[in-house]
Amino acid sequence: MLRALELATRGPENGRNPRVGCVLLDPQGRTLGEGWHGGAGTAHAEVAALEDARRAGHDVRGATAVVTLEPCDHTGRTGPCTEALLAAGVARVVHAVDDPNPAAAGGAARLRAAGVEVVGGVRQDEGEALLTVWLHAVRTGRPWVTLKVATSLDGRVAAADGTSRWITSAAARRHAHGHRAAVDAIAVGTGTALTDDPVLTARPADGSTVDRQPMRVVVGRRDVPEGARLRGPGGPYLHLRTHDVTEVLSRLAERQVRHLLVEGGPTLAAAFLRAGVVDELHAYVAPVLLGAGPSAVADLGITTIDAAPRWRTVRTVPLGDDVLLVARPAPVAPPGAARTPEES
């Protein structure tokens, strides 16, 4: 299963489909074939592994298929993986995560009904971690939301005169562009679109562009000029003329957006935070002090420290002199829970 999880990471992080890996084993535990899903419209991991075994001249009858996600049992742009496994004579299927997608679920039951031994939940935690974004989007019906901010040590996103290029270092900006390439859509407010005229593309260090660009989303009611750079070459452009965060997420879910990156500015960041829909925070912090200028987040309506939402740090990443802090919402303590001496 660890090998199947490793294979799954070769698939694209973005897109509507999950990253899946598969290893086929003979009864003695020897590898017959390996495969992974390369994205929408390509062979699923199980079919890719069967094809790999066929090219190697291996007979897979009686084999075990080790898969990171329960095999699908529906026909989309490709056929059901269950049918491919049954036609190949696979005798046993081991998977990490049950498929929560109503359109594709039921693969385990279909295989069992046909006499195949099915074992689920193997390395489930690792499988869930690999599929965090996709599983969240399928289970909740809305995209996973990452909020990105780039600030000085004192939380400013620009100086008092409005200048902001560049607070963070080239290393931090390269990292941020790498993350852009992994998401399905990037959102900014009309204020940022009009003031900064961003391109909102994922660009490697050499200045080129990656093949698959995220959708560029502008949120707000003001018009964006036809000549704006984010209307130029790059990912699809979408203007959502609303201030309702729930509507934004619903409209994006309709377009199969699984991962939304919110990049600015302070007003849009505050709107998503106040709505309680930010699943992960990426804070790029540069060792510079400004003392004045706009903050990363507008008013959240918090009047006392006890009302401030808490976050837990998932990891920190040094980027030259800068640091990236990745955080997720901390679990909410039940009412009346006792505080530790340090918290009192």
Image (cartoon, rainbow, N blue to C red):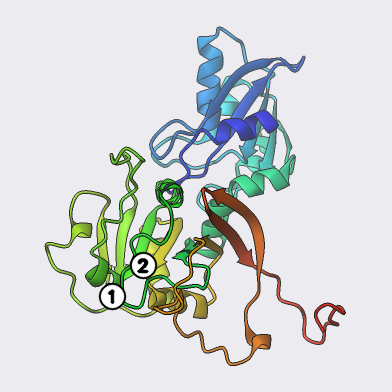
Question: Are circles 1 and 2 on residues that touch, CB within 8 Å?
Answer: no
Looking at the picture, how far across and down is residue 10, in whole percent? Answer: 51, 33
Image disc number at residue 23: none
Cα distance between the residues tagged 1 and 2: 21 Å
Visible residue check, residue 98: no
- Going by the image, does 108 lie left or right of 276? right
Q: How many marks?
A: 2
Three-letter code, disc 1:
Gly
> For mark 1, what is the residue?
191
Q: Secondary structure at mark 1?
A: helix
Visible residue check, residue 233: yes
Asked whether 270 or 255 is in front, the reply is: 270
* Residue with the most extreme top position: 57
Asked whether 159 or 278 is in front, the reply is: 159
- Going by the image, does 101 lie left or right of 75? right
Q: Could you tell me which residue is drawn at 46 percent across and 74 percent down? A: 272
> 341 above or below 301?
above
Q: Could you tell me which residue is drawn at 35 percent across and 80 percent down? A: 243
Image disc number at residue 251: 2
Three-letter code, disc 2:
Arg
The C terminus lies in quadrant: bottom right
Looking at the picture, how far across and down is residue 198, in whole percent? Answer: 26, 60
